[in-house]
Amino acid sequence: MRTPSSVYNRGRRMTEQIKKKLQEDINALEHELSHELPKELKRAVALGDLSENAEYHMAKQRQEFVKARLRQLGRRLADLSLINMNNIPRDKVGLGSTVRVFDNTKNEEMEYKLVTTEESDVAAGKISTTSPIGRALLNKKVGDSVVVVSPNGNRDLDILRLTTIHDEAGAEA
C-alpha cells in the first residue's frame, strides 16, 4: 500500500544522496580555491612579468571558473532543498517516473526514468527532467502524444505506460 511517508522517505533519500555528492564537489572546489590555486598563483608571480605569463593567466582563469562553479553548485544545492515529494503528481509524469513510450520517429519502444540533472545517464535510460525529452514528457499521462524538439530533429512519442515515484514507493512498502 502506498503511503505518503514512503514516498517522502524515498524522495528524501534520493535528494540526500544528490546533496551529499554536491557538497563533496563544493568541498573539493573550496579546497582548490583556498589552498591549491593561491600556491599556483604565487609560483606564477615569482616567474616575473605578469603580462606575458601564461601560468599566471591560466591560474587566474581556473580561479574564476572555480568561483563560478561554486556559485552554480550552491544554487543547485539550495534548489534541491525546495523539492517537495508530495507535490509530484500521482497520475502524470514527474520526477522519479518511469515512462514507456513508442517512438514513432524510430518505430520502437523505449523506456525512460526521469531524474535530476545530477543523476542523468542517457545510456542507462535515466534522463533529466530538464532535457528535451524530459521537458516534453512532464505532466503528461498514459495515452498522450508528445513532440520532442531537439537539436537532432523532432521526435513523436506516444506514452504507453507510466510508473510514478508514488507507485514505486508503494511497491517497496
Image (tube, grey):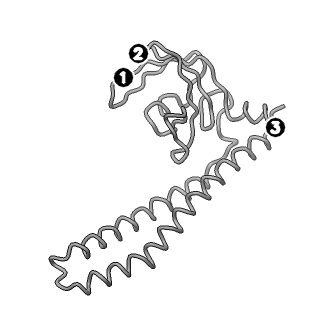
Q: What residue is disc 2 on? A: 105
**Element type at marker 3?**
loop
**Residue 171 screen position, x and y as percent:** 78, 31
Nearer the observer, 13 or 24? 24
What's the amino acid at mark 2? Thr
What is the x, y in percent for residue 55?
25, 74
Q: Which mark is residue 154?
A: 1
In the image: residue 13, left or right of residue 132: right
Please state which of residues 43 and 136 is positioned toward the viewer in this rendering: 43
The mark that comes first in sequence, 1 or 2, is 2
- Please give the residue where the numbered disc 3 appears in the rendered image: 3
Residue at the spot 79% in from the left edge and 41% down from the top edge: 6
Q: Is disc 2 surrounded by few (<14), some (14 to 19) or many (20+) residues within 10 Å? A: few
Whole-percent x and y of residue 155? 40, 21
Distance between the alpha carbons at the discs numbered 2 and 3:
38 Å
**Amino acid type, callout 1:** Asn
Left or right side of 25 for 82: right
The reply to whether discs 1 and 3 touch (Cβ–Cβ < 8 Å) is no
Tag 2 and tag 3, C-beta contact below 8 Å: no
How far is the residue under mark 1 from the one under mark 2?
8 Å
Nearer mark to the viewer, of 1 and 3: 1
Q: Quadrant of the C terminus?
A: top right
Regarding mark 1 in the picture, which secondary structure is present there? Answer: strand
* Whether label 1 touches label 2, CB < 8 Å: yes
Q: Earlier in the sequence, mark 2 or mark 3?
A: 3
